[in-house]
Image (tube, helix red, strand yellow):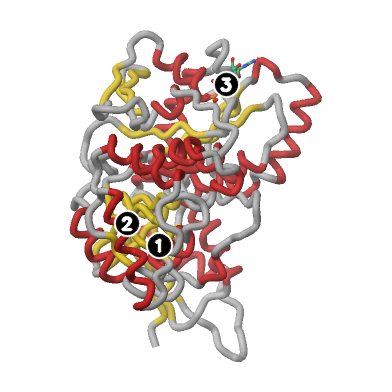
Amino acid sequence: DPVLAIVGRPNVGKSTLVNRILGRREAVVEDTPGVTRDRVMYSATWNGRGFTLVDTGGWEHDARGIHARVADQAEIAVDMADAVLLVVDATVGATATDEAIVQMLRKKKKPVILVANKVDDIQNEADASTLWGLGFGQPWPVSALHGRGTGDMLDQALEVLPKFSAHGGLERSGGPRRVALIGRPNVGKSSLLNKLAGSDRVVVDPLAGTTRDPVDEMIELDGRVWRFVDTAGIRRRVHMAQGADFYASLRTQSALEKAEVAVVLLAVDEVLSEQDIRILNLAMESGRALVLAFNKWDLMDDERRKYLEREIEQDLAHVEWAPRVNISALTGWHKDRLTPALDRALESWDTRIPTGRLNAFLGELVAAHPHPVRGGKQPRILFGTQASSRPPKFVLFTTGFLDPGYRRFIQRRLRETFGFEGTPIEVAMRVRE
Ligand code: GDP
C-alpha cells in the first residue's frame, strides 16, 4: 500500500485527524504525557482504496518544543511516505515550528496536502487562507474534531498518492526471502548483521537523495541469498533521546510489513524489557513467520540461565511455537543456526493443508472430543478448509458458535498434528443457520 504520513507541530490535532480517518472514537486520543504508543502505522481505507497511515502524533509529548527536533523527527516519517499531510492550526497560523517543518518538506519533494485544522465553522475559513503563504498550494480547511471538510481533503490526498508505494511492499513472487531483523536498541542487531554479512554484503534499494531511506541488504548464508529489509535503520545508529520510541516503532512496523519472516532479537544479559515485549507483540500481530534469537550468549552464566528459563516460561509462553536460537553476535557463535530456523518458520508459514486431510483431522478430533453441550445445544463442525497461507488461516463451518476454549483446543491440536513451528495460525468460524 502507498504510505501517507501525517506531520505537524505538537497540538495541531494530528491524533484527532488520525482517529477521524480511521473512523475511531475520539476517546483514543491520548493526552497523557509520556504515553508510549506502540503502533504508529495503520491500515486505512478511503473510497475503497487502501493506504497506510503513519501517525507522528504520539512521540511529541517528550519533544519539549524544540523546533528543529520536531522537524527532525517528522523527517523520518516523511522519508517512509509517498505523500504527506501537513497539519497546521488555522486558528494560530504558521509558527516557527511549522516553518521548520515546511523547510524540511521542501527538500523532500514529496506531494504535500496542506491541512488547515480547527476550522470548525464557516466563520474561521478565512483563517485558513493565510496559509497559502506556506507555498504548498491550497490549504484544505477541516475540523478533525467534527469531521468537517475531511472527506474533500482525503479525496485530494488520494488524488496525489501514488497507487503503489515507491518503497516496495511485499513481493509475493520469487526472489530472495525477506527477513526483518528487529529488537530494541543495543540488543545487537547491528553486530549480528555485520557477522552475518561478513564481506559479501550487497546493499540494494538505496533511494536517492537522503541518508535516511530504508535500505535492504542481500546477504548470502549457506549458499542462499536472503534479503534483510530496512537495514539502514539498523546501521544508522540514530541516538535520539526524544521520539526514540516513535522511531523504533516506525522502523519495526515498516520492516515487518516488507518481510516474510521476523527475527526478534533478545539479549540474555539483561531482563526482558517492556520494549522487548512490545516489539515481540508487533511481530506476532504482523502475521509474519517468527524466529526468536537470544543474543549475547557469551555473557550467559548460571544465574542468568535460571532467570531466562523462568522468563521464557512466563513472558514468552504465548510464543512457544516460535523456533529459538541461542547466539552470540560478538563471537559469531551459532550464527549458522539462524538459517535452519528461518527455513522451518517459512516452511510452516507457506503450508497448505489439503482439505481432505484437514477434514480427516477434524473428524477424528470431534469424535474423540465433542464440543460441550451448552443450553441443550451442541454446535457441530460441518467441515473446515484452509482459506489462505502465509500465514495459515483456517475457516470452520459450524452449526453454532464454538466456545473460545474449544477453538483454542482446536488450534492447539492443529499445531500438534501439523507442526506450524514458527508461524502464527488463525482459526475463524462461519456459522451456518
Ligand atoms: P543494536 O542497537 O541492536 O544494533 O545493537 P549493537 O549491535 O550496536 O550492539 C549493542 C552493544 O552490544 C555493542 O556494544 C555490542 O558490541 C554489544 N553486543 C552485541 N552483540 C553482543 C554479543 O553477542 N555479546 C556481547 N558480549 N556483546 C554484544
> Mark 3 sits on what residue?
327
Where on the picture, by quarter, is residue 229? top left
> Mark 1 sits on what residue?
90
Mark 2 to mark 1 CA distance (whole Å): 8 Å
For badge 2, the amino acid type reads Leu
Q: Which residue is drawn at 66% across and 15% down?
A: 298
> Mark 2 sits on what residue?
131
Q: Which of marks 3 and 1 is nearer the N terminus?
A: 1
Horizontal side, residue 245 vs residue 257: left or right: right
Where on the picture, by quarter, is residue 270? top right
Query: Do the residues under discs 2 and 1 have CB atoms within 8 angstroms?
Result: yes
For badge 3, the amino acid type reads Ile
Q: Residues within 10 Å of mark 1 (few under 14, many from 20)?
A: many
Q: How crowded is mark 2: few (under 14 residues within 10 Å), some or many (20 or more)?
A: many
Query: Do the residues under discs 3 and 2 have CB atoms within 8 angstroms?
Result: no
Q: Residue 139: image x %, image y %?
A: 28, 60
Q: Is residue 358 above or below residue 261?
A: below
